[in-house]
Amino acid sequence: MDNSEAQKKERGKEVKKRIIALSLVLAMSASLTFPVAAARKDEVQAEKAATESKLSAAESKADELESEKNALLGEIDSLDQSLVQTMAQIEILNGEISDKESAIEDTKQKLEDAQAEKDKQYASMKKRIQYLYENGGSNAWAQMILESGSITDMFDKAEYTEKMYQYDRDELQKMKDVVTEVTQLGEQLTQEKAELEDMKQAQEEQQSSLQTQMDQKKAEASDYETQIANVQAQAQEYKNLIEQQNAELKKIQEEEAKAAEEARKAAEKAAAEKAAKEKAAKEQAAAEAKAAEEKAAAESTKAEQTSTKSEDTTDNSDNNVSEDTTDNSSNSASEDTTDNSSNSASEDTTDNSNVSEDTSNDDASNDTTNDASNDTSDNDSNYSEDVSDDSSSTTDNSSSSTSSATGEAVVAYASQFIGNPYVYGGNSLTNGIDCSGFVQQVFAHFGYSLPRVSDAQAGAGRGISYSESRAGDIIVYSGHVAILTGDGGIVHASNSAPYPQGGIKYSSNALYRPYIAIRRIVE
C-alpha cells in the first residue's frame, strides 16, 4: 500500500515536470520573437522621426522659397505697372511733340506770310516815296502850295501827305512787330518741343531701366520655381519613405499582435492541458484511494466477524473510520483542484495584460497633439504680426503737418535751386532730383507731407481751376508736376538735359502742355 502511493506521487511529479517544461518552451519561443521585433520597431521609429524632421525642413524651405517668389512676383507686377505707365507717358509725349511740330510748322508759315506782307508793304512805301521825289523832289511842296486855290486847300493837301507818310510808317512798324512776335513764338515752340523731347528721352531711359530690372526679376523668379520644384520633389520622396516606414511599423505591430495572440493561446492551451492532467491525476488518485478504502473496509469487516467485541462497538468504530477517511479524501481533492485552478487563472491573466501592453503602443496621438499645438501657436503669431503691421500703417497715414507758409514763400524757396541737375529717382535738391521729388521736398520744408510720385500728387491738397490758381499751387501734367509761380510760369525739375534746357529751371508758359489737375496745398 505504501509502495503504490509512492508510485502515484512520482507519476504526479513527472506529469507536472512535463507540463512545466512545455510551458517554458512556449514562453521562450515567444520571448525570442518579441525582442527581435521590438528592436526593429525602435529602429524604424527612429528612422521615421529622422525622415519626418527632413520632411519638415524641406516643407519649410519650400514655403520660404514660395514666399520669396511671391514677393518677387509682387515686385515684377509693380515694375510692370511702372513700365506700362512709362510707355503711356512716352506715347503722350509723342502726341504732344507732334502737336508742337504742327504748331511750329504753322508758325513758320505765319512768319513767312508776315515777312512777305512786310516786304510788300515796304516795297509799296518805297514806290510812293520814289514817286514824290521823282516828280519834283523838294519843289513838290512849293508846287503844291502854288497850285492850291486857298490856304485851306494847301493845308488839306499837306495833311494828306503827312497822313500818307505816317500810315506807311505805322504799317511798316506793325509788320515788323508781327514778324518779331511770330519769330518769338517759333523760338518758344522750338524750346518747348526740345523740352518735351528731353522728357521723352528720360522716359525712354526709364523704360529701358524698368525693362532690364523686370527681366532680371523674371529670371530670378524662374530660378525660384526651379528650386521650389526640387525641394517639393525631395519632400515627396520623404513622404514616400515615411509611408514605407509606416507600413513597416504596421507590419511589425501586426506581427507583435499575432505573436502575442499565439503566445496567449499557447499559454491557455498549456494551462488547460496542465489542468486536465492534474484533474485526471487527482481523479485517478481519488479512485485509488476509494478502492483502498473499500479494501480496508472489507478487511475491517472480516476482522470484526472474528473479533470478540460487541457488535455495537465494532459498528461505531468502522463508521467513524469510514467517515473520516471519506471526508479527508474529499477535502484533499477539492483543495488541490481549487489551488490549481486559481494559479492557472492568475497566470493567464498576467500574460494577457502583457500582450495588450505590447500592442497598444502608437505614436499617432502624440504626433497629432504636437501638430495641433504647433498650428495654434503659428496662427497666434501670424495674427500678432498682422495687427502690428496695421497699427504702424495707421500711424503713418494719420500724420499731418500744419504750416503758416505762403505760396510766395514756397516759390521763393523753390527758386533757390534753379540751375541744379535733374536726376530720375533722385532726392537731393542740390545734387539731383526728379520733378515729383522736387515738389515733395519743397513742400516738406514747410511741413507738408506729399506723396512721392506725380500721379499721387494729383490727389494732394484741394482741387481748383487754373483761373483760380496763384503762386505756390501745383500743376500736374501727364507724368510731370511743377509749382506755379503766379505770373503764368512754373518752376520745376524739367529733364536730364543740362541747364538751362533741363535741370531745375523756370519756364514762362505753364500751359505749354495739357495739364491734369491744379492742386492747392498752402491755403
Image (cartoon, grey):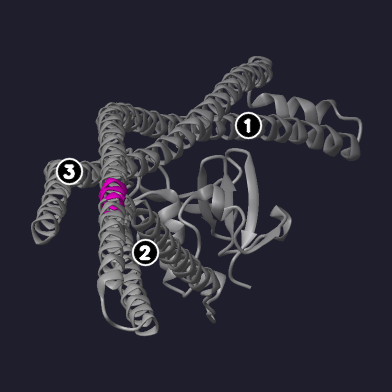
- For the C terminus, the image quarter is bottom right
Q: Is residue 367 left or right of residue 431?
A: right
Q: Amino acid at mark 3?
A: Leu
Is residue 62 something that shows in the picture?
yes
Looking at the picture, how far across and down is residue 397, in whole percent?
A: 53, 68
Which disc, if any, is residue 178?
Answer: 1
Q: Is residue 131 left or right of residue 398?
A: right
Look at the image and say whether residue 273 sits in the magenta stretch: yes
Looking at the picture, how far across and down is residue 43, in whole percent?
A: 14, 43
Look at the image and say whether residue 448 sits in the magenta stretch: no
Identify the secondary structure beneath mark 1: helix
Identify the secondary structure beneath mark 2: loop
**Separation of residues labelled 1 and 2 (CA atoms):** 36 Å
Question: Disc 3 designates what residue?
Answer: 26
Magenta span: 272-280
Looking at the picture, how far across and down is residue 295, in whole percent?
A: 27, 59
Q: At x 58% / y 64%, what residue is drawn?
A: 471
Which disc, if any, is residue 416?
Answer: 2
Above or below residue 244? Residue 309 is below
Q: Residues within 10 Å of mark 2 (few under 14, many from 20)?
A: few
Q: Residues within 10 Å of mark 1 (few under 14, many from 20)?
A: some
Q: Nearer the viewer, residue 364 or 325?
A: 325
**Separation of residues labelled 1 and 3 (CA atoms):** 128 Å
Label whose residue precedes the other's in the sequence (1 or 2):
1
Q: Quadrant of residue 213?
A: top left
